[in-house]
Amino acid sequence: MSAGALEGALALPEEKYRVCPDTGLRVYAKAETLIKANAVVAVVFLAVGGLFGLLVALTRWPAVHLLPAEWFYTVLTAHGAAVLLFWVIFFEMAILYFASAVLLNCRLATPKFAWFGFILMVVGSLMATVAVLQGESSVMFTSYVPMKAAPHFYLGLILFAVGALVGCIVFFGTLVIAKEEKTYEGSVPLVTFGAITAAIIAVFTIASGAIILVPTFLWSVGYISNIDTLTYKLVWWAMGHSSQQINVSAHVAVWYAIAALVLGAKPLSEKVSRTAFLLYILFLQLASAHHLLAEPGISSEWKVFNTSYAIYLAVLGSMIHGMSLPGAIEAAQRRRGFNKGIFGWLRQAPWGNPAFSGMFMSLVLFGFLGGISGVVLGTEQINLLMHNTLYVPGHFHATVVAGTTLAFMAITYLVIPLIFRREVIWPAVARWQPYIFGIGVAGISLFMMGAGTLGVARRHWDITFSDSIFTFDYPGTAFLMMGLNGISAILAAIGGLMYVVVVVGSILFGKVRDEAAVKANPIVAPGGAVSAYGSEGTLKLPGTIVLVSVFFMAFVLYYFINWKFLSEVWPLS
Amino acid sequence: MAIQPVKGLWWNEPLHRMELIWIFIAFLWGVVMFSAMIYWHIAGQQNLSNEAYRIDPEVFAAKAEAMTEQYQIGEEGDTGVPVVHPPPGSDVYMIARLWEWWPVLEFEKGQSYRLHLSSMDWQHGFSLQPVNINVQVHPNYDLVLTITPDEAGEYTVVCNEFCGIGHHTMVGKIRVVEKQ
């Protein structure tokens, strides 16, 4: 970028930046350091939380039954906190700073305030983790009252949430600065738009969290005598479920970012993709209801309206992205000349590039496993068949692990060269990593859903009931499912370990990415970054039509099968 | 490029026909799924009751004990959990507490019962196996389900809401016998 010197003179004197040789974007040092810090802490929590997850799966494998009961419930609580909260949200802070400061060519607003938020998050996450590992706070991720955790468990979560809120404020501030200082022209990039969606939902999420966690903390130290169990669930899930919608918005933005960087893919239509994000902002928050379908004292009218996001309007948003993304990839591939047959573009996609393969698997697994199971599970009456069974973790491992985590892993392979300025070490390990992790997670999700369909309870140490006064045997198939789940978890753990090793190794020992490396090993698709915006509307996309048709048929079929299952249980009203 | 700012009037651009069709289909499918839930309330047999009351755990326990005293037909298990055969159509109570479902209930096939569920302490999960009916049980709330067992046999109530260290030992029984 030739105007670099001039722009440097215009920036505030203390703000150092470099021009990225890959993308031509200005990267400010302070933003970059914060992105690195958040990403590193995220990966640490992924490593620790992933290990906890493996221990959980090996305990639930009846033939192995690794941990004693007390440890099992402690480790299960720690697993949820470390990965579902800390790994994803630290990584999302990195994404917010990237999508604002880097993509908009802008300095970060109030870097010191951002560091303050970061420190709050680190202190809070450590405090909550310690509280859990001390053993007095094995209350599960949900910490349903009147089960009580140690006060510093709630306090840690509150500090963590306040830190995340600070991150969101810095993100919004950066948007204002970018607009004010005219660091970009036109509308913000689609990826930034997705990040804005995530940040808006995050503010709602954190507000809900404050409304419920602050009184719960006061209750745990004795200042409040009683918390209503239903109210707790309603408000807690306005945080708990909405935080998963932050993940959805963030990982959809990551999908678009990877497709753009690796293939130069443009959305089929900016209008459609942005409207889909808008639907998330407007309707996803209603999903607290998904967790209240089997509760007493809530009317069916309320349940039906809220559980369906008002006539499935947020699902509509996801289905739009589910067409728009493969469509954008197909269009980009065809433009590059991969035109053979219906699926030539897909066959000749860069499957050896872990950023692409991870993104595409994340897209497929999130849609087919996570999306369809989520809608079925969230159907008011069908929920009766699945509430609190292993079907529930089966579903959300498809969304949060196969979807969010895999997408975040995939973009890491671009973050290492672009932000950490290092070459990825051990390319062969990196190449296989998304496949091994993806197949493992797909197995975890499918087999837990299978066991859940057979009635197996979630969060349960002993499904043989050996210490109970009454005996009961789940069907033999359920035990098979738990074994296969254990094997899949080992596979996923190997994939996770490969990821951690490659990331840590590359950051510490990777070759520094200099100009020569940029030429020899380009990260950004040739012609991609420089191509101007334009609608892809003129291309024919038969492959995408086939893909979404298969998806739709699977969705309809599986949906009605579950109504059939429901019709076979005892009549109740 | 999704990572670059967008110039021009992108909101005025025409939509790809494929996108329009897909959005239309997806929206219509949403309407179908929304209507399915309402339809099931009208024509379906399995709907979770909206009937629930606030209740003190002691009051609920007293009702369950009164029912047990009146209709007990035996005992089961090492700890002698009473087995209760309440008359069809009556109000039937099952207590959830750390870590048992109390008492054992015996129903007649094809008869309806008003089953009351409430917890004495923490939240519990009523998971009836192998039928696979799963509902949440709260303290201070009395959930009333009208159930009609349609097959005779022994059924198990597993707790599927985590309730502490003895959670996995919390198992109860419901028996369904032929009409008497």
Image: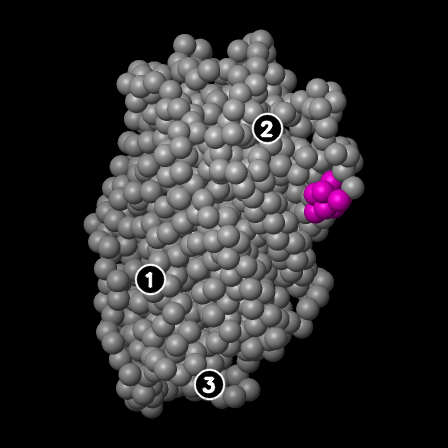
The answer to whether marks 3 and 1 mark residues whose Cβ atoms lie closer than 8 Å is no
First along the sequence among labels 2 and 1: 2
A503 part of magenta stretch: yes
A82 over A324 or under it: above or below? below
> What is the magenta range?
A500-508
Q: Chain of mark 1?
A: A
Q: What residue is at 43 percent from the left and 78 percent from the top?
A: A220
* Amino acid at the residue labelled 1: Leu
Give the mark toward the camera: 3 or 1.
Answer: 1
Residue matched to label 1: A234
Residue matched to label 3: B81
Q: CA distance from mark 2 to mark 1?
A: 47 Å
Quick one: quadrant of the C terminus of chain A? bottom left
Q: What residue is at 41 percent from the left and 10 percent from the top?
A: A538
A449 over A407 or under it: above or below? below
- Which mark is on residue A19? 2
- Crowd tier of the residue under label 3, counting other residues whose Cα lies within 10 Å: few below 14, some 14–19, many 20 or above: some
Q: Secondary structure at mark 1?
A: helix
